[in-house]
Image (tube, rainbow, N blue to C red):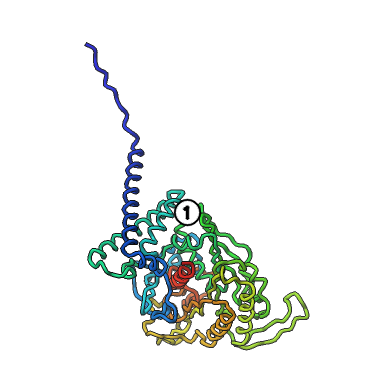
Amino acid sequence: MPKHKHQIVPNPKPWGSIRSSLHSLIAVLVATLLVATVYLTQEYGVQFLEDCTASTTVKTSEDSCNLFSGKWVFDNQSYPLYKGLQCTYMSDQLACEKFGRKDLSFQNWRWQPHQCDLPRSLPVPCSLLLFLFELMHFQSLFRLRSVMSLFFISLTESLLLFDKIKVRPKILASNLRQTLRFNATALLERLRNKRLVYVGDSLNRNQWVSMVCLIESAVPPELKSMYTNGSLTTFKATEYNATIEFYWAPLLVESNSDHPMNHRLPERIVRVQAIEKHARHWTDADFLVFNSYLWWRRSMMSVLWGSFESSDGIYREVGMPRVYEMALKTWSDWLEVHVNPNKTKLFFVSMSPTHQSAEEWGVTTGENCYGETEPIKEEGYKGNASDPKMMRVVENVLGELKTRGLDVQILNITQLSEYRKEGHPSIYRKQWDALTEKQLAKPSSFADCIHWCLPGVPDVWNELLYAYIFQMTG
C-alpha cells in the first residue's frame, strides 16, 4: 500500500497578517471617527464650524478675557511641554538642568488667565481633519508616530464628546473641547511654506530657542536642519518648507553692537535713522516677532548721524527714553513702507523683567535670583527693573502705526514674567569665562538673573504667540 506523503504547507509570513490586522484596525478606527465627525457636524454643525475657528481665538479688549492677566498654577502633569535634555538645539546658556540645577519645579508652572484658558489645540472635528490630512502625507515611521499621536487626540476627543452628549445632549460645543497641550504638528501646518522670524536681542533668542524646542520633536532628524549666516540663524522643517529664524539686532536699528558674537563694547553707539542693513533679511517674512529693551537700559546713548566708516559723522549724546523713541520711529516707518499687512503678521514682545535685586521681593539686601525656587505670589507685583516709560513709548509708536493702517500685536509678557524670580539660569549655565575665587565664594555674584531657563517661562510666551498665529490664520 502506498504511503501517503504529508505535504508541509509553509506558514504565511507573520508580517503579512500583522500588516493586514493593522490596516483593518486603522480602517475601523478611521471609519468610526468619520461617522463621529458626520454625526457631530450634523447635530451641532453650526456650533462646530464656529468652534473650529474659535478654539484658538484670542479674546480682544472688548471681551471679558485678557490672556496676559492671570496667575501661575503648578501643573506637573502637563508641563514641561518638552524635555530640555532631549532638545537637539538647546542653548548652553539656557540649559539649566544640563548644568546642574536640581530643583526642576520651575518647569512645571502653567500660566492661567483669570477669565479663560490659553488655547492649546484644535477641537473635534478639526483635530480629526488634521489627522486625516497627515495620514495621507506620512512618509516614515517617525511621521507615523506623529500621525498616530494626532489620531489618538482625535479619538479621545470624540469619545469625550459622545460621553458628554449622552449625558447632556444640549450642551454647547464650545464647552465640549478637551484642552490639550501645545500641538507642534498643528503649528507646523500653519507655518507650511512660511517664515517665522524673531528679531531682537538675546531675550528674543531665548524665546526663539524655546519655539525650536517646542517644534523640533515633531520633525524627524533627516527632515530638520539648523544653519547660520551672519546675524541670521535658521531652523528649517524641510517637509513643511517652514523656517523658524532668529536675527540678531539688539537695538533694531544699526549700532556698533550688531555683530552676533562680538558685541560687548564699552561704549554703545546707535544709528537711529538706519535700519535697512538688518531689515533686508526679514522683508518677506510671514510672521515677525520683535523685541528691544534690554540694550537700552542706560540713561544716555551716543547717537551717530552718518556711517561708521565715515570720518565726518556727527555724534551726540541723547537721553532716554528719547533715543529709544527715535529708533522705534525709524523701525515703524520702515514697516509702514515695506510690509504687506495681507501677508505679514507683526508682533512686539514687551520688556522681559530681571530679578537682580532680592530686596524688591523682601529678601536680604545684596542678593538676587540665586537660590530662589518659588514664584512670587503677590498679585500685581512689579520689580524696579521694568521701566513703564519705555513701554509707553512702544505703545505710542504702535498706536500711531495703527492709525496708518498697520497693526502690531503686543505680546505683553512683562507682568506674567515678573512673578517668576526662580525661572532664571542663575549659576546653572555654561560659563564662558573662568570664574575667580571671589566669584566662587559668592555664587550670586555671577548669577544670570536676566535670561530664562528652558523649558520654562519663554514657553508660555510662545503659547501666547501660538494662540495669536492660530487666530490670524484661522
Question: Can you name the residue that lies furthest to the top here?
Answer: 1
In the depicted view, which residue is nearer to us: 397 or 471?
A: 471
In the depicted view, which residue is nearer to us: 20 or 212?
A: 20
Whether residue 427 is visible: no
To which quarter of the image does residue 319 belong?
bottom right
Q: Is residue 72 above or below residue 24?
A: below
Residue position marked by numbered label 1 in the rendering? 220
Tell how many labels: 1
For label 1, the crowd category at 10 Å Cα-Cα, with few meaning under 14, some 14 to 19 and many 20 or more, is some
To which quarter of the image does residue 20 belong?
top left
Where's the N terminus, which quadrant?
Answer: top left
Question: Can you name the residue that lies furthest to the right here?
Answer: 312
Look at the numbered disc 1 and give the secondary structure of its residue: loop
Image position, residue 363 (x, y; %): 40, 85
- Taking the spot 53% from the left edge, 64% from the top edge, the residue there is 244
Image position, residue 313 (x, y; %): 75, 81
Question: Going by the image, does 305 lie left or right of 339?
Answer: right
In the depicted view, which residue is nearer to us: 75 or 376?
A: 75
Image position, residue 4 (x, y; %): 24, 17
Q: Amino acid at mark 1?
A: Pro
Whether residue 280 is visible: yes
Image position, residue 199 (x, y; %): 57, 71
Q: Is residue 224 above or below residue 114?
A: above
- Taking the spot 43% from the left edge, 79% from the top edge, the residue there is 68
